[in-house]
Image (cartoon, rainbow, N blue to C red):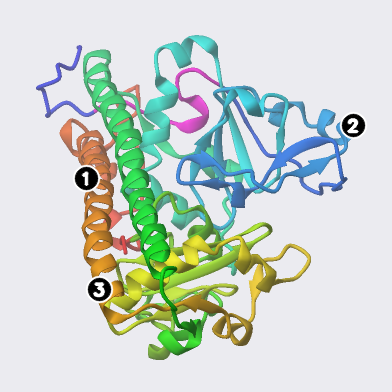
Amino acid sequence: MTTEPHDLSVPWPVVELKDFPGIEHTAYGIARPEKVPDGVPMIGATEVFEGTVHARELTFVPLKLAQRHPRSTLRPGDLLVVLVGRVGETAVAAEEHQGWNVARSVAVVRWKPESRAQKWNLWLRWWLKTQQSRSYLTLSSSNSEHATLPLQALNRLQVPVPPEPVRERLLALISLAEHKNVLNIRVAALATELADAYFIDALKTCGRRPTAERAVGEVGRITTGVALTPPDSEQLTMPWVSPHEVLNCRTVHLDTTTSRTVAQPEAVCPSGSLLVAPRRGEVRTVLTTTLVVPGRRTLAIHTESEADRMWLLHSLRHQRRELTALAQGQQARAMRRKDFSRHKIPWPTDEVRRDFATRAAALHDLSFAVAKEGQAMEELVVHEMTQGSIPLASEWVSETGDRLPSEPLSDLPELSRA
């Protein structure tokens, strides 16, 4: 019997991911890569972030080594799934990634052309965002310092197969959400760039008269990040921010994290703190909108007033290239608090800073609002996928009508948003 879009009583068939329509194969990447100065680019887990491949500093492996892993040699449209750390994070290989390979920390899900035409790949990518998927992947991962998901466990993930009318309706909603998200990210970026422009204009105004300089450590309280400490049983945890999350954050506002940690009260940074993380060629500064614990190689700054916070944020954004001189290590991914606290920035009068903050804060409100709208749309889509026509996991049935065993969702750890 065909399930109509309005019929919410008929459970959808469920299959394991390895049997999902149109999947050609799933594969591990390269286990022991031999890194070379030039060769075939290789994507690792840290490059897969928020649905995108962030390959700023490419890792290369010898051509012969890559050729020994043909199943993970990328084609456009391949789905990349993180297996280590941020388990379940996904991205889609683009045209530019043709012929690249991946590390063993990333799984490659390859599709048959006809399944991509039917957008089954889009359905699976969004199903991996649901609480059902995340709970299963968390439960199936090891409990080591870095959670690790076996490929076999990924292949056993239960995925619903909605009937065509329902699937078309929900895929249209997913496509709308993705297009709207692209627009929202662009609006947020433009709002932040306009605030940057106001800052430069304020600097030019200051240039017409003597302007004092202050060290960063004089205008804000600086703290260093801590290592991730997984909880034991019922320990209270706080959102933990890795330097990669700071560096790859799509907007200037960071309000969600993928990990939680056990931390001492002094390690927790209040909402409105600035987080600073370096990498080769750049130092990135973002503004938190929730309580967070910064990770190692991340510095946090707390200011007393919005005027100080806005001026400091845009000062550090304006000087992100100059700040790279403070970065240490072969990959320039660390920065000493002592050196950073001595860094000088222009510090005009209270009146100038307050006037700038008034303009900048309004633009930050706009940027944050459109980002939250994107999150709300994603939550709506995920809700429709899991609640609109699909029963709870404990009630799923196979294509033959047999019930599939599942863990009780009430016993699984919640992956709460920051």
Towards the viewer: 26 or 402: 26
Q: Which residue is mark 2?
A: 64
Q: Amino acid at mark 1?
A: Glu
Front disc: 2 or 1:
1
* Kind of residue sitting beneath label 2: Lys
- Mark 1 — residue? 373
Mark 1 surroundings: few (<14), some (14-19) or many (≥20) residues within 10 A: some
Seen from the viewer's position, the closer of residues 343 and 331 is: 343
Residue 282 locus on image (x, y percent) = 61, 59
Q: Is residue 320 above or below residue 231?
A: above
Instruction: Identify the secondary structure beneath mark 1.
Output: helix
Tell me whether the residue at label 2 lies in contact with that at label 3, contact meaning CB atoms closer than 8 angstroms. Answer: no
Q: Residue at x 46, y 14 (%)?
A: 115
Q: Position of residue 143 (x, y in %)?
A: 54, 66
Observer able to see residue 232: no
Residue, x 87% and y 32% (percent of image)?
Answer: 63
Q: Is residue 106 left or right of residue 351?
A: right
Q: Earlier in the sequence, mark 2 or mark 3?
A: 2
- Does 322 sit above or below residue 7? below
On residue 354, the disc is 3
Q: Which mark is residue 40?
A: none
**In this view of the protein, can residue 183 be seen by the observer?**
yes
Instruction: Tell me the residue at 24%/46% (across/down).
Output: 370
Q: In the image, which residues are magenta?
A: 12-23
Left or right of 57, for residue 221: left
Quarter occupied by residue 5: top left
